[in-house]
Image: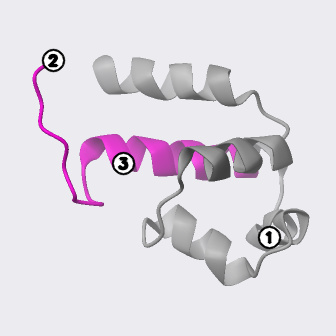
Amino acid sequence: MNKRLTKSLYTAEWEILLKTLKGLREQKGWTQEQIAEKLDRPQSLVAKIESGERRLDVCQFIDYMRVLEADPVAVMRQIVKTIQNPE
């Protein structure tokens, strides 16, 4: 894969990440407010993350996964797999 890094928030890959984050939250049956409370952050931050307005760095991704009670490595593997083999 010889792709250049993109600055755009609106790529197919980014959409996969966002859908994954939201899907994990919804699988738990949790609201954005509940995630925000666990992160000790405002609900608006979770909304911005899920809508793609706010990016997560690697450490924030790990914290987000911890709050969702998900294995960050397993989730990232699934995201990469989905990116490489879109349905």
| The residue stretch that appears in magenta | 1-26
* Rendering coords of residue 4 (x, y %): 12, 37
* Rendering coords of residue 2 (x, y %): 10, 22
Residue 46's disc number: none
What's the residue type where badge 2 is placed? Met
Residue 20 within the magenta-colored segment of the rendering? yes
Say left or right for 56 vs 52.
Answer: right
* Rendering coords of residue 16 (x, y %): 41, 41
- The answer to which of marks 1 and 2 sits earlier in the sequence is 2
Q: What residue sits right under mark 1 in the picture?
A: 36
Q: Residue at x 65, y 53 (%)?
A: 60
**Image mark count:** 3
Residue 2, relative to residue 45: is it above or below?
A: above
What's the residue type where badge 1 is placed? Ala
What's the residue type where badge 3 is placed? Trp
Give the quarter of the figure containing the N terminus: top left
